[in-house]
Amino acid sequence: MYEPTEDRLPYVLVFQDCHDIRWSVHDSEEVHELEADLIGFSIGAESHKKAAVITTDIFELSIIYGSFVIQKNW
């Protein structure tokens, strides 16, 4: 969810042509939560040049990808 105003709005991160996805859990007690707080997001580089890294309070996700799109405002 992102909050550009007072409303919480959904979004989807779409990574295509992925070559490697790594998942690392920081807080195993919270792993079943439906939402995590976003701490950091590095987009990396397309065409498999540098991994995107998404860091939350519960987990970190590293993705080597071909292309990336954010879908929002449905």
Image: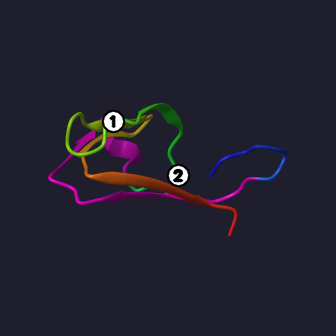
Kind of residue at disc 1: Val
Front residue of this view, candidates 71 and 58 = 71
Magenta stretch holds residue 17: yes
Q: At which x and y percent is residue 72? A: 63, 60
Under circle 2, the secondary element is: loop
Under circle 1, the secondary element is: strand
Residue that appears at 46% across and 55% down: 69
- Name which quarter of the figure residue 45 lies in: top left
- The residue where tag 2 is placed is 35
Q: Which span of residues is magenta-colored?
A: 8-31
Horizontal side, residue 44 vs residue 18: left or right: right
Residue that appears at 33% across and 34% down: 44
Front residue of this view, candidates 23 and 62 = 62
Q: At which x and y percent is residue 21? A: 20, 50
Residue that appears at 23% across and 60% down: 17
Q: In which quarter of the image is the C terminus?
A: bottom right
Kind of residue at disc 2: Glu
Q: At which x and y percent is residue 73? A: 70, 63
Cα separation between marks 2 and 1: 17 Å
- The residue where tag 1 is placed is 53
- Can you say whether 74 is above or below 66 in the image? below
